[in-house]
Image (tube, grey):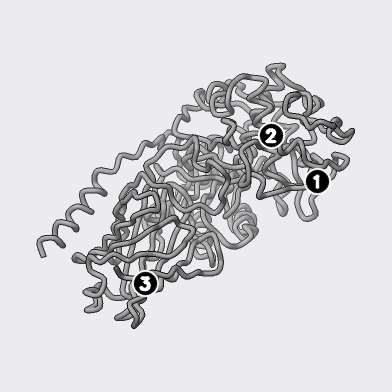
Amino acid sequence: MKRRISLWLLAIGLIASLPVSAQINELPRSTPEEQGVPSKALVALFDSLHALPLTDMHAVVVMRHGKVIGEMYPKPYAPEYRHTMYSCSKTFVGVAVGLAVADNRLRVEDRVATFFPQLLPDTVSSELASMTVRHLLMMSSGVKPDWNMRSRGKEWIRTFLAKPVNKPGEYAYDSMVSYMLAAIVQKVTGKKLTEYLQEHVFTPMNVTEWAWEESPEGVNTGGWGVHIQPESLAKFGQLILNEGSWEGKQLVPAEWIREMCKKHKETGREVYGYHIWHCGGHDGAVRADGALGQYVISILDKDMVVVMTEATLGNGRDQRRLIWDVLLPEIKDEPLPANKKDYQKLLKKQEGYKLDEVQGKANSAFASNWENKTIELGKNTLGWESLRLNFGKNIVTMTVTEKDGKSYELPFGYKEWKTTSMEAYPPYSISPIDRFKGLEGPYYVSGSYAWISKEELQLKAHYVNWVSALEITFRLEENGEVKLNVQTNYIKKPYTINGKIK
C-alpha cells in the first residue's frame, strides 16, 4: 500500500514540476463582437470541430483584425505545447526563399544545378540543367517523388540530383523539393533556415520557442519538421495576411508575399502558389497545410487567421468547410453590440473542451496478474523492449524500457489526464534518417486508463507537444502470453504486439 501511495504522489509531483517554455498571451485579445463576429458562431465552430469523427483537435486559434477572438485547447493539450507541423513547414521555406531573393542572394530563375556543382551526377541531362528555383517553388521539378528517399541514405542532395528528370513544369508534390530549396537558401546565405528566419522574421515577432528538424547533411528538412506553438503559428498567419508587415515594419517584401499567394499551378481540385495553397471553397484564403490536419489559414478578404493543430484520419476538407459554412457567413464588417451572455458561454466552452478519457472501471482483481511483472515484447515499431505495470489508487504507472536500454515511467489517470515528461522520442508517423535531429526534449505525455473488462486494461497516451497518440489494450492469454492491441492516431488500422510475462 505504501508503494502505491508513493507512486501516486510521485505522479502528482511530476505534473506540478513540468517546466514548459511558452510564448503565449502575447497577441492582443478581444471579444468577438468587437471585431464583428458573434460569440455564438465561434461556439458553433469549436463544437463542430471537436465533434469531428476520426479526429483529435489539439488547438484552434481564431484571429480577426490582428486580435485573438477565440481559442480552444482540448485537455490534455495546452497553449504552451509545441506541435510538429509536417508540410506546413513548406510555407516557411517559401518565405525564406523570398528573403534570400530580396537580399540578392538568388533569383527564382537561377538553375538548381549551379548551386551544387560538386554533387552533380557525371552526366547532367538537359532537363536537370533547365530546372530552376521557380520550378521547385511550384512543385514542378520534373523529378518523380520518392517518399522513401529520405529513409534510405544520408546524401539527400546528391541523391535528388541523380534522379531521372522529366521536362520541368508538370506539378508533382514532393517534400524533397522543399528540402532542396532549404539547402539552396543555406548555401547562398551561409545560415540554416532556422537562423535566417529567426534573424529576419521571428525575432521581430518575438518568436523564439520553435525548432526545425535537420537532415543528416545538417540542413533543415524543409518539407516537414517545424516544431512550434499555436500562438506563434497565428503570428505567422498574420504576417502572411499583412503581406509581410509586422507592427508597421516590413519583414518580408510585400511583393514576394503577393507572388507566393498567386495561382501558379492547378492541381485538380486545388490551386498551388509558391509553397502555399489556395483554399478551395473560398477564393480569398490561402493556407499552410500539413499532414494529419495542420493548418495556418489566412483569410485575406475577411482579415482573419485560423490556426488548427490536430491528428485527423480524414482529409481535412471537413475542417475547412466548417470555417466557410459555420463561421464566415456570420462575420460583419462593423463591430457588433456586446453580448455578455454569449461571450461568457464562449469562455466557459473554451475552458471545458477535453479529449475523452478511457471509459471503464478503475480497478480489477485481474491487476494482480500484471503487478510489477516484466512483459517482454516482440518486434515492434515503437522500439520498446519491455514494459512493467504498477497499480495505485486511480493511477497506473507503466515503465517502458527501450531497445537501447533506456527506461522511463508514464502515469495514466482514471477519469483524468496525468501528464509527465520524458527524454525519449515520441512515436512518429514517418521515418527519415536522423529524425528528431535539431529538436530538443523533453516531450510531454498525458495518460488515461480504465479496465474495459475484468481482463482487459486499456491505456491511452497523448504526446501533447508532438502529434502522436497511442491506445493500448492489454490482454493476458492462458499460456502466459500477452497481446497488446495498439491503435495510433496516424494509422487507421490497429496492430498487435506480442509479449510474454517474464
Q: Is residue 328 left or right of residue 63?
A: right
The tag on residue 474 is 3
Q: CA distance from mark 2 to mark 1?
A: 20 Å
Q: In front here: 351 or 442?
A: 442
Helix, strand or loop for disc 2: helix
Q: Are marks 2 and 1 in contact (CB under 8 Å)?
A: no
Foreground mark, 2 or 1, reads 2
Q: Residue at x 75, y 51 (%)?
A: 270
Helix, strand or loop for disc 3: strand
In the rendered image of this protein, does residue 466 appear above or below residue 240?
below
Q: Residue at x 37, y 73 (%)?
A: 482
* Residue denoted by label 2: 157
Disc 3 packing (10 Å; few <14; some 14–19; many ≥20) = some
Foreground mark, 2 or 3, reads 2
**Horizontal and vertical percent position of residue 17:** 24, 43
Q: CA distance from mark 1 to mark 3?
A: 46 Å
